[in-house]
């Protein structure tokens, strides 16, 4: 009889097993389109060898990026959510084991003609819900998948904070370079203003030339103040990313390290392992799949085993004698007979939720592919643009000097000098911006590829 009951239980358990989980198919191409014909000088496993920000060769950036993991509050919140998810797994796993309780009581009763007496009782009990239909195991699997998703969310938050820090730091160093350029420009415009003043005083140049020179100088000085404001804002943003008050962080001006790392793109399939947001989305599909099994288990009866052993008596000294022993052992079962299709509706809801999670997973893969393609295309274009910007800046600087020399001897009007000055300054600033764009694009590519994180 016992063997028949066991076999019957196994058969029912097999019927109640939730759907097997399979990772949803993702729309992957064989290779990145924008990576064709691009041969980076870096080895294919470059991002696996430690912190990715060290690829930029800036010691200050590296020191700041290491602080993000410790002090950034968004990362701290994601870490706390991961700890919460792990605790939820432990709670779900505890449901697989019996619950043991111990209680004791002592009372004294009496009244009327009845003689007052003492009553003592000690009882130990246990209850257990056998996971015959796999509902509890499905709950554990779902909680584990959710915890793994939270772990990936933590990695994504860390990568986002580090990437934002790197972009802000590059912007700050760009501001330093622009301030140095504008400082040199203001000094040059001051010299030109003096030259113009001398020509006006000598009567060989109209006063309009002096007004134009003053305008140029004032505009350049105003631009320098604008960059100073932008630099201060970037420094404040970096402080917040480090979990500090803006007043507690000061970054002194320093030379800009113009190193632009060549990031290997790898194959599209590696994104499924590298991107923490994709890993999180996949784990949420697994968690949703487990909910289907939990919903299906409602078709089967709920079983519970319970037992207790205790002693009761009026004398404390003989409380634990055999004559005072009480015990019980029981099996209970409960089954929903009719609920107007509510169980089936819950299963349909769980299945639809799984489909939603699967669609979100596929969309996260598509978004990741697009981000990598975008940054690969930008990397190629910006490299070409920087070369053109260098040519433009060099040519404009030569024209500016030639126009100034010709103005000194009265061969050209001051308007032509102004035009050359504006063109040269814009070309130099555009070159600095192009250099910064290449670095920020490299950061964005690292983020699009998942940084140095790998799916466990």
Image (cartoon, grey):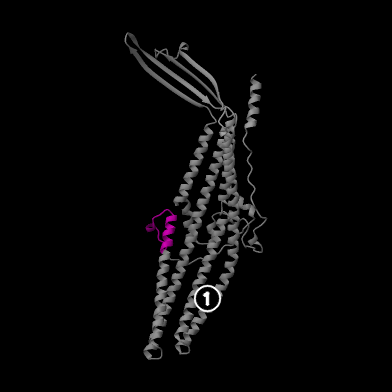
* Residue 206 in sight here: yes
Residue 281 placement (x, y as % from top left): 57, 47
Residue nearest the viewer, comparing 200 with 238: 200
Q: Quadrant of residue 342?
A: top right
Label 1 secondary element: helix
The extreme front residue here reads 340
Q: Quadrant of residue 344?
A: top right
Q: Residue at x 46, y 50 (%)?
A: 74
Residue 269 placement (x, y as % from top left): 64, 52
The secondary structure that most of the magenta stretch takes on is helix
Q: Is residue 105 above or below residue 343?
A: above
Q: Quadrant of the N terminus?
A: top right
Q: Residue at x 58, y 44 (%)?
A: 285
Q: Is residue 250 above or below residue 272?
A: below
Q: Residue at x 63, y 46 (%)?
A: 24
**Which span is picked out in magenta?**
232-251
Few, some or many residues within 10 Å of mark 1 (<14, 14–19, 20+)? many
Q: Which residue matches tag 1?
A: 393
Q: Residue at x 45, y 23 (%)?
A: 102
Q: Quadrant of residue 129?
A: top right
272 left or right, relative to 126: right
Residue 280 placement (x, y as % from top left): 56, 47
* Residue 59 in sight here: no
């Amino acid at each position: 009889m016992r063997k028949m009951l066991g076999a019957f239980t196994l058969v029912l358990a097999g019927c109640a097993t939730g759907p097997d989980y399979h990772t949803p198919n993702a729309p992957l191409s064989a290779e990145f389109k924008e990576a064709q014909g691009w041969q980076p000088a870096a080895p294919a496993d470059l991002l696996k060898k430690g912190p990715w920000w060290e690829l930029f060769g800036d010691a200050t950036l590296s020191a700041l990026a290491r602080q993000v993991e410790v002090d950034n509050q968004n990362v701290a919140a994601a870490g706390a959510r991961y700890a919460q998810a792990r605790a939820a797994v432990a709670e779900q796993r505890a449901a697989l084991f019996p619950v043991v309780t111990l209680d004791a009581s002592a009372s004294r009763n009496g009244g009327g003609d009845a003689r007052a007496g003492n009553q003592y009782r000690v009882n130990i009990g246990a209850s257990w819900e056998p996971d015959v239909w796999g509902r509890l195991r499905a709950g554990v699997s779902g909680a584990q998948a959710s915890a793994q998703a939270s772990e990936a969310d933590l990695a994504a938050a860390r990568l986002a904070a580090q990437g934002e820090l790197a972009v802000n730091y590059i912007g700050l160093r760009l501001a330093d370079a622009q301030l140095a350029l504008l400082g040199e420009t203001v000094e040059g415009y001051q010299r030109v203003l003096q030259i113009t003043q001398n020509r006006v005083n000598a009567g060989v140049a109209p006063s309009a030339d002096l007004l134009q020179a003053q305008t140029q100088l004032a505009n350049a000085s105003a631009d320098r103040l604008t960059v100073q404001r932008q630099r201060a804002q970037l420094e404040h943003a970096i402080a917040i990313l480090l979990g500090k008050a803006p007043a507690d962080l000061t970054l002194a001006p320093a030379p800009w390290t113009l190193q632009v790392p060549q990031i290997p793109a790898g194959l599209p399939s590696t994104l499924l392992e590298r991107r923490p947001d994709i890993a999180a989305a996949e784990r949420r599909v697994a968690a949703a799949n487990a909910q289907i099994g939990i919903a299906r288990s409602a078709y089967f009866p709920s079983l519970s085993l319970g037992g207790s052993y205790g002693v009761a008596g009026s004398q404390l000294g003989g409380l634990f004698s055999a004559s005072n022993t009480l015990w019980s052992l029981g099996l209970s079962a409960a089954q929903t007979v009719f609920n107007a299709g509510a169980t089936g509706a819950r299963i349909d809801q769980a299945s639809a939720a799984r489909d939603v999670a699967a669609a979100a997973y596929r969309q996260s893969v598509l978004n990741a592919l697009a981000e990598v393609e975008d940054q690969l295309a930008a990397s190629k274009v910006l490299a070409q643009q920087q070369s053109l910007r260098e040519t433009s800046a060099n040519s404009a600087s030569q024209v500016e000097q030639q126009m100034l020399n010709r103005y000194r001897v009265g061969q050209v009007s001051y308007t032509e000098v102004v035009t050359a000055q504006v063109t040269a300054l814009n070309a130099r600033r555009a070159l600095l911006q192009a250099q910064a764009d290449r670095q920020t694009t490299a950061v964005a590519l690292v983020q699009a590829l998942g940084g140095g994180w790998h799916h466990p």
